[in-house]
Amino acid sequence: MIRNLFVICVALCLALLGFFSLTHREPRADFTYVNPSGIHTLDPARMSWLQDFRVALNLWEGLTTWDPQTTKPIGAAAYFPPEISDDGLVYTFHIRSDAYWSNGDPVTSHDFVRGWRRAIEPGTSADYAFLITDHIAGAAQYVQWRQETVRTMSALRSKEQNDAMDSAIRACANQLPKRFNRVGLQTPDDKTLVVHLKTPCPYFLDLTAFATFLPIHRSIERLQLRYLGTPLTREGLIAFDPQWTKPDFHHKGYNGLVTNGPYMLGDWSFKQRARLVVNPYFREADHIRCRTIDMLEYENVSASIMAYEAGDVDFLTDLNVPYKHELVRLAQTGRRTDLKLCKVLATQFLNFNCQSDTVGGAKNPFKDPRVRKAFTLATDRNRIVHHVLASGDRIAHSFVPPDVIAGYTPPQGLGYDVDRAQSLLRQAGYPSGDALGTVELLVTAHSVRLGEALAGMWQRDLGVRVELRVQESKTFAQNKAIRNFMIARGNWYADYNDPTTFLDCLATANGNNDSGYSNPRYDKMLADARTESDPQRRAEILRKAEALIVKTDCPILPVSHSSELIAIKPYVKGLYPNPRLWFPFRSVSVER
Amino acid sequence: MILALTRRIFAGIVTLLLVYTATFVMVVSIPGNPFQSGDRNMPREAQQALRARYHMDNNWTFYAEYLTGAIHLDFGPAFTYSDWTCNQIIASSLPVSMLLGLLAILIALLVGLPLGVLGAVHRDNPIDFLGLFIVILGISIPTFVTGTAALTLFCVYLKWFPVGGWGTLRHLPLPALTLSLPFIAYIARLTRGSMIDTLHSDFIRTARAKGLAERTVIWKHALRVAFLPVLSYLGPATAQAMTGSFVVEKVFGVPGLGQHFVNAALNRDAGLILATVLVFSAVLIALNLLVDLLYSVIDPRIRGAL
Amino acid sequence: MITVTLALAATLALRRSHPVRWTLTIASIALLGLLTLAALATIPWTLSMMNVQQLDDAVRHAPSAAPVLSLETLTHADDSPSIVTRALHDVSSWMGHDDLGRSVLFRLLPAVVISLGIGFAAAGIAVVIGVLFGAIAALTGGLTDRLMMRLVDVLYSLPYVLTVILLKIALTKPLTALLGGESAIANLVILLVAISGVSWLTMARVVRGQVLSLKEQPFVEAARAAGAGWTHILRRHIVPNLVGPVTVYAALVVPQAIMQEAFLSFLGIGVQPPTPSLGRLASDGVDAVNTFVGYWWLIVFPCAALVLILAALNFIGDTLRDAVDPRAKSVMM
């Protein structure tokens, strides 16, 4: 009897668990693709992963977007081109009359201001806030004032002066509208947005297509965290309940995520799947062929390839597997026409520590540019890229990839010359490789092969003892941030279609300047380029600046320009490989 | 009995508190910024703002606030996947892990028990050695090897099952089977040893003397007694199956809690680490308690010792 | 003295009663011994060759059974490189090369040493900590005993792999500082500490149980009555009775530790490259499984080595347990 009871209990348990975990599967979506790393966040202001951008830019629509084949900026929610003043400092955008949100509301200029403001608010902690603060007049000052408030609040909180905190919050809230008015964004009416820039920016229309510049629907204000009736939290931040990105969050009068792009979010389960469905209010909704799109999350890339081969998946990106070289070979020889190699605006390089005198107690030889130049000359990039990496990447002799940005040809950097390398080392005071001591190379598990190949190469050609330190990505990032490395691997994806997205990284005190390189001449050249309005002269200034990097000072060692391997089933039409990896799904059709 | 039960529950709660403290200490001493991902560095002000928002700037307040939240079953936000709360993550993945674990244990019982009994009955025969061979292989082949082999064979070449993932009944058999292999081995071994013992005991001799059929003697009478050690193993085993399936989850792409824990640990996501550890420990303690209860119910001799 | 005699007696009894098991056990010990000896003996060569990358000509090459010291090799006696170098080059392709052109054979042999080293070291640490902990808890009794056992309970309530992962991540920074900077050795030590940090628990419980039951035995009481000190009792009565169970559990910790290391390497937090270990080589091989091109030598050799070693160790442990305590109902945790 007890045994029967036990069996019934177990069966009930199984049934319950099955009910809760085996989610109901609707019919297969029109188009299925895989996002290997998963969605980190759907908040357009906070996202920094390419895969997240891909989803966001299909859910929302900015003032401009990129052409799927040429990746040049074209019109989106605003008529194109906008009115631009003669000095290039004032842009006037007119929002389309047929631009609507997924709940039927028309898209207004206030939605854009709301979105841009969120992106620079300290409470959002956006990685890309600098895109707005660097260009829009008054934005940087506003942010500075806001950060002062947050610091004041933090100081008051640690002293536990509650009354002072409350009055400070109220004072700050009173000043908010006045302060924000000083930012160069004006909305003369619901359909017009006037943007004032600090300095002319030739790629501004390229930027406005970026996720940071997306509009946000006003329903988000229902989920604003308020303290004492002000739009601020107790820490002085402007923050919203993170659940606003959920399609099914119906609390406090909120009706779920509202977007204005060709698709809206139908369903989203953590680390499993996101389903996009056509936004019925989108102006071209009737022309969109794929009515539902499934984004699956497969952490194991090999498994996603197997699913693709089995026909469960229609589109794969970023195929990074140990046998990638085999897939690249299949793509390059044309044996598999569904595998395509895209030249990407990204560079893999090594950071030399140009600032510290010692690293972990040992002397840092890389403060001397001659040593850096020697190591650069002793790196056989041909062998690394074609034999070790063998993943279709191109050899990098410059920081900015060639042939990708129109109107800019990067300078040719240093080649492979072991004799010159050795003589440079001798000049720098190191008669042999041993005199350098143990050189440490910092990598993560992803780039172990590269690290091992480099270590072997330098040991052989320069006689240097190289120790490879493989660390987890978090520890690695920490060590890079505090400059606890001699050489560390780096990777940079372009944020926009201009050489400055790469070159700014090496400006003094730039947040992403891991090597600590600081050269006033270089900074001056970048500043000159910023104010130069003639595009050809500007390109020449930037080219000279980059030559300083890759030929003379060598704070970084460019290794390869990335190529991404993607797989598109032959029955999928409308996806064009491009260096931005920009894939708008509204032009995709699947003819199975 | 009620008193003993209450005492056990109280001990369990104390254990959970200690587990929480131990994990908290480990978590705050791990270097690494949970809020940064990818190659770009996060601006310092942004970091500070986030730490202020999540009340992480002071370890003591964080400890107290998190504990208060945990008691109300509110585990706070996940730091790396900022759109989700820990509660949502656990609610979506705990049933998955539990289902997988429970199925694995059931399969292990269904296969392991007969295997062990046969080994005991035909001791030192070729059948016994076949069983021994299976057992030793079961605990010597790493799960990622068997899993990948099964995935490649059954999903890619034979196309019997979908290639990893989760959501329908067809996604269940392969991961559950892979996970069950080591448990089949242990249960078979335990049953065999215990069965050998029981078959030598007095009451079995009496049963045989009474003239009962050998099959009844073995399967009805001996097994019931020989099952007890297996039962006491089932507690930790089920907990281990439910919470230790990281590798199977990684190979088959099953969105279970184990995988989230590993990622949280690698991402330094303090909130999610604490949440998963607490949930796992609670499951373990609860299962141990359940098994001890069952033990006392099945074996009246032990009821008093609870 | 007594221990050795007991062991011999048990062994002979086993041979008589279970001949097949006896043969298999001897075979396992022989296999392990041979592998270990081969791996250890070739260390001078494998250690130097294990990270040598032949990027030009040997990337991802299949195995080739190149005959060592063929007539051709011998007749080129005057040319450089030396015979040894050429022989090594030939031998290196017996199990193929990986994607950096490194010989699988020359990585497999040190990997065997490292994995077995991790296993035995973890067992050793588990024995030391477990015995001390359990014995002290049992002998002191009272509140100390309860507290110590509560600690064991708490650690038991944490899922095994969770604790190992957390320990490894948490201990990396302090131990690295302690060991004077990061290196392959430091990483191995950290991994070892993490794995053995949870392996001693069962040992502690078993030892405590044994010592508790022994403490109440009549012969101990008699010895106390005769005026013997605790040291004497420990040495003559308690420790010899502990040897059996402790050996059994230690023997079971070794394969467990090797398996845990394999799991951790698969998850990416085990032994760090370029240091080879059986777990790392096996997971690298598994990662390379695909439907386009077969790299069978990257999977078959490391996995076969791993499975054989683990099977041999598990079998020996199992036999020991049968011999010492066939009624052991506690679990291989």
Image: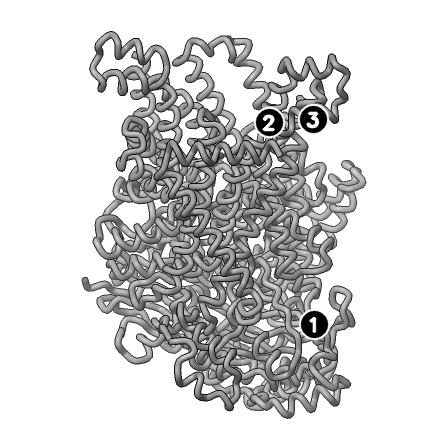
Report how far apart the C-alphas of labels 2 and 3 lie in the structure.
10 Å
Which residue is under mark 2? Answer: C241
Which residue is under mark 3? Answer: C234
Kindly identify the residue that appears in the image at 74 percent across and 81 percent down.
Answer: A368
Proximity of marks 1 and 2: CB atoms separated by less than 8 Å? no
Which residue is under mark 1? Answer: A438
Picture layout, residue C21 above or below residue A484? above
What is the total number of numbered labels drawn onto the structure image? 3
Viewer-side residue, C127 vs A466:
C127
Residue A345: image tag: none
Question: Left or right of A417: which side holds C87?
Answer: left
Which of discs 1 and 2 lies nearer the camera? The answer is 2
Q: Where is residue A563 in the image (x, y as percent from the top left)?
A: 43, 74
Report how far apart the C-alphas of labels 1 and 2 lie in the structure.
52 Å
Report how far apart the C-alphas of labels 1 and 3 lie in the structure.
51 Å
Residues at discs 1 and 2 both on one chain: no
